[in-house]
Amino acid sequence: MKEERRSESSAVRINKYLSQAGLCSRRQADFYIEQGKVTVDGILAEPGTKVMEGQEVCFEGKPVHMDRQVVYLAYHKPKGIVCTSSKEEKNNIIDAVGYPVRIYPVGRLDKDSQGLILLTNDGDAANEIMKARNYHEKEYEVTVNKRITNEFIQGMRNGVPLADLNTVTRKCSVKKEGPDSFRIILTQGLNRQIRRMCEYFGYRVTKLRRVRVMNIRLGGLKEGSFRKLTPEEIKKLKEELTCER
């Protein structure tokens, strides 16, 4: 009886198991489960399924093990690369990076944009970084198609209504950098947010580059290249994430 209780207490939800095993984020795991791609001891998993020690978990028929090398990468995404792990997309970010360990992107950077995106197999960390309620900063350099006015800068700072999303963007930091360029720091990640914000004021983005995610900076990383995060970067990143829980 005691042995059974120990096993039950150590059981983890199937989406958390897949995340900790480095297969994907918890959100993606839920999708895979709904698609019938995950089994536990040969039985199709459900969203509430719990995994106990000694049980065999498989994804698309292949065993998923908890032993893994934890990886954190910074990648300078070029234009044209799509932030998906789906092999159906020929320009997917996983093939572009070509890393030997299974990883996946943390959040998205649209196809027409470039700059910093993180990749990891640490599902819990990825989930915390992507949660909008945590107000994580992401910094961008943006060029538009005409001269920038003070009214445009003030409008961008104070929140922009996005009718198609039925929302108003959060107030943010915006600084003019040149006649047609500015720097913006967001704490949310709506789909094509900066482009939509600019369009509201009659501007069109001609270049968009993300240069920072939380404490991780793009720096001099060449376009199309990646690097491992330093131990100091990982430590600070995890400290920030731990403080929010």
Image (tube, grey):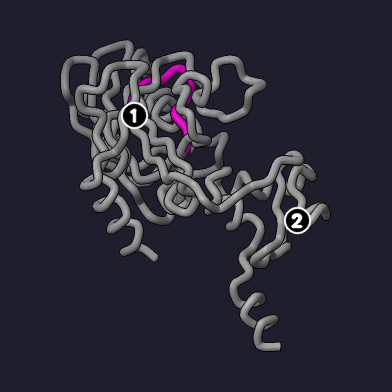
Please give the label number shown on residue 116.
1
Which element carries disc 1, helix, strand or loop? strand
Q: Is residue 65 magenta?
A: no
State which quadrant residue 174 falls in.
Answer: top left
Vertical side of 230 occupied by 115: above or below: above
Most frequent secondary structure within the magenta stretch: loop
x and y, in percent, of residue 184 in the image: 27, 33
Q: Is residue 217 left or right of residue 187?
A: left
Tally the numbered discs: 2
Q: Which residue is mark 2?
A: 40
Quadrant where the C terminus is found in the figure: bottom left
Q: Earlier in the sequence, mark 2 or mark 1?
A: 2
x and y, in percent, of residue 66 in the image: 55, 53
Front residue of 52/199: it is 52
Front residue of 32/191: it is 32
Which element carries disc 2, helix, strand or loop? strand
